[in-house]
DNA sequence: TGTATTTAGTACATAAATGTACAATCAATT
DNA sequence: AATTGATTGTACATTTATGTACTAAATACA
């Protein structure tokens, strides 16, 4: 039995009581929430031995995925999908752990430069095998064509959210 | 330009640096995160005038979608996708606001019964028009067939997460 | 019956995330 | 140059979420 059934059934009853209720959008939004929570929890559990959590992992990986391993806080906020105030806190923690470094930018002195340290890079390469295994397990229920189709639809969904 | 582009580009670079990195699963997970955050923020903004937030709304709606407007905390945790400790806090708040009521169950005295009050029901029917409008706007970028397809794929994704 | 195990819910301490106000700097205009 | 308005980032208070340990009650079973 799917863990989503209790939710879905209650949305069905809601529609009966309030016929204008848009069932499909509501189901989609709830599904996204359930999936996100699950993925988030799994990632946190997997990363725990490495002493970091899911948002910190996301930040490290966005730096890893940038030439020079360097980004500003605001770029990081965009890429990692975090609010800027949260980036400050998260990058502070990562600095404390010596995984990234914060230096002042001299081109624009308002800006700050966050760079992966050698230590941070080593940790990433340490946990990447586990991360890959987890990601493959998580998406393992989908055929490649289904994954591609899902990606396309999610992007369309997000693009429209961005406009509205 | 999609708000997802910065993320996607960095995942592409990650794949170049670390070829075993499973690009598609990673993209899907990030998309889900971005969408969830966006939907969550929008809902919070819309609900603010009503004096409740998104998780509180979810709880109210799960009660509204149940015969008798009544659930136990653990059922609520399943349906709303929240951890049980969080349900305690959220339902406390809703009790304080007189939107739900907490009573002891007599069939099983470990259990607690949470029921929508008349006031809670009235509030739900007050904000439902706004909620419907928001949901329709959020999913408005998808054709009905696309929404159905997306639902199917997300369910498959979640089902597999539940197993693994 | 008595004892062990499981289940339901919560309290409390801690962690994580957000809103808001602010300081510093840059850019544009006068 | 001086002023105005926007941008970048952070500090701090508050809100929101989680882990863990615990109580009470139900269930299993010797």
Image (cartoon, coloured by chain):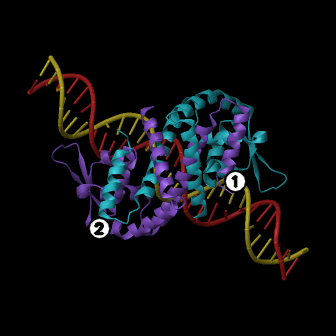
Chain colours: A purple, B cyan, C yellow, D red
Instruction: Give residue C11's position: percent from left, percent from top.
Output: 64, 54
For disc 2, the chain is: A
For disc 1, the chain is: B
Judge by depth and name the residue closer to the eye, D17 or B135. Answer: B135
| Residue at mark 1 to residue at mark 2: CA–CA distance | 43 Å
Work out which residue is located at the far front of the displayed protein and give it. Answer: A145
Query: Residue B74 — which label?
Result: 1
Residue at figure coordinates x 20%, y 50% from the top left: A104
Q: Is mark 1 on a helix, strand or loop?
A: helix
Judge by depth and name the residue closer to the eye, A138 or B119. Answer: A138
Q: In which quarter of the image is the C terminus of chain B?
A: bottom right
How many marks on residues? 2
Q: Quadrant of residue B52?
A: top right
**Disc 2 residue crowd, few under 14, some 14–19, many 20+, Cα 10 Å:** few
Query: Residue A119 — which label?
Result: 2
**Disc 1 residue crowd, few under 14, some 14–19, many 20+, Cα 10 Å:** some
């Amino acid at each position: 039995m799917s863990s989503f059934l209790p939710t879905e059934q209650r949305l069905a009853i809601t529609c009966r009581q309030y016929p204008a209720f848009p069932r499909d959008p509501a189901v989609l939004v709830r599904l996204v929430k359930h999936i996100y929570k699950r993925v988030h929890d799994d990632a946190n559990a997997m990363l725990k031995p490495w002493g970091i959590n899911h948002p910190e992992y996301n930040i490290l990986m966005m730096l890893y995925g940038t030439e020079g391993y360097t980004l500003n806080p605001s770029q990081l906020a965009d890429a990692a999908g975090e609010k800027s105030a949260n980036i400050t806190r998260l990058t502070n923690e990562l600095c404390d752990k010596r995984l990234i470094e914060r230096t002042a930018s001299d081109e624009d002195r308002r800006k700050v430069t966050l760079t992966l340290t050698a230590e941070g890079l080593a940790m990433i390469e340490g946990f990447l095998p586990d991360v890959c295994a987890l990601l493959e397990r998580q998406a393992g229920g989908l055929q490649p064509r289904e994954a591609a189709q899902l990606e396309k639809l999610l992007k369309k969904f997000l693009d429209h959210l961005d406009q509205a």
